[in-house]
Image (tube, helix red, strand yellow):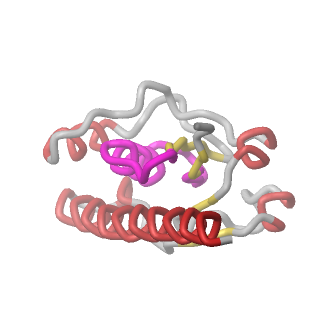
């Protein structure tokens, strides 16, 4: 089975998108995987990102913050931004994709309680996305069987 990709994108790929990738890939919808990238990636992940992920039993994804590429966008079935891509940092071709925006604040600028709240909000969004993708795949499979 060919895996379908969810791309979590933000500016730095240092907090939100990395956490979303780790959360989604812990228990992905069948046939799906997540990647993350940024339009202006940081040299390293925010140090608190690793701490906050470990608190919930997760590790940072195995890659450093990475540049969002046209190839990543083209290969992704679902693209989710974190509410951080403004006109200056958003590639024009990202705007033509089916896009979801979760409008989350940058936890790197918040205290630990705020960082944890963003992590909780991300977890809820990721779980909802997993369910939605699984239901959509089940619906397509049912249609194929009946058709």
Give the total number of marks visible in the rendering.
0
Span colored in magenta: 7-32
Residue 79 in the image, given as x and y percentages of width and height: 63, 59
Q: Residue at x 45, y 62 (%)?
A: 134
**Residue at the spot x=74%, y=59% of the render?**
90
- What residue is rendered at 25% in x and 65% in y? 120
Q: Is residue 132 left or right of residue 147?
A: left
**Could you say which quadrant of the image residue 77 lies in?**
bottom right
Nearest to the observer: residue 140 or residue 19: 140
Specify whether residue 16 is painted magenta.
yes
Image quarter where the N terminus lies is top right
Residue 47 point in image, percent of width and height: 31, 36
List x then y, in percent, for residue 71.
Answer: 78, 38
Residue 37 magenta:
no
Q: Quadrant of residue 147?
A: bottom right
Give the residue drawn at x 80%, y 56%: 91
Which one is nearer the viewer's eye here, 111 or 4? 4
Q: Work out whether 97 lies above or below 26.
A: below
Residue 107 placement, left or right of 133 = left
Foreground residue among 133 and 126: 133
Left or right, 62 with respect to 73, comes to: left
């Amino acid at each position: 089975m060919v895996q379908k990709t969810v791309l979590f994108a933000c500016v730095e790929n240092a907090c939100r998108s990395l956490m979303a990738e780790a959360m989604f890939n812990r228990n992905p919808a069948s046939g799906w995987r997540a990647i993350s990238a940024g339009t202006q990636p940081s040299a390293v992940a925010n140090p608190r990102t690793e701490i906050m992920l470990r608190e919930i039993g997760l590790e940072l994804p195995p890659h450093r913050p990475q540049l969002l590429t046209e190839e990543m966008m083209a290969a992704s079935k679902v693209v989710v931004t974190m509410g951080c891509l403004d006109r200056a940092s958003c590639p024009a071709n990202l705007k033509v994709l089916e896009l979801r925006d979760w409008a989350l604040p940058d936890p790197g600028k918040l205290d630990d309680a705020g960082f944890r709240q963003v992590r909780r909000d991300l977890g809820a969004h990721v779980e909802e996305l997993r369910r939605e993708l699984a239901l959509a795949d089940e619906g397509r499979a049912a249609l194929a069987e009946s058709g």
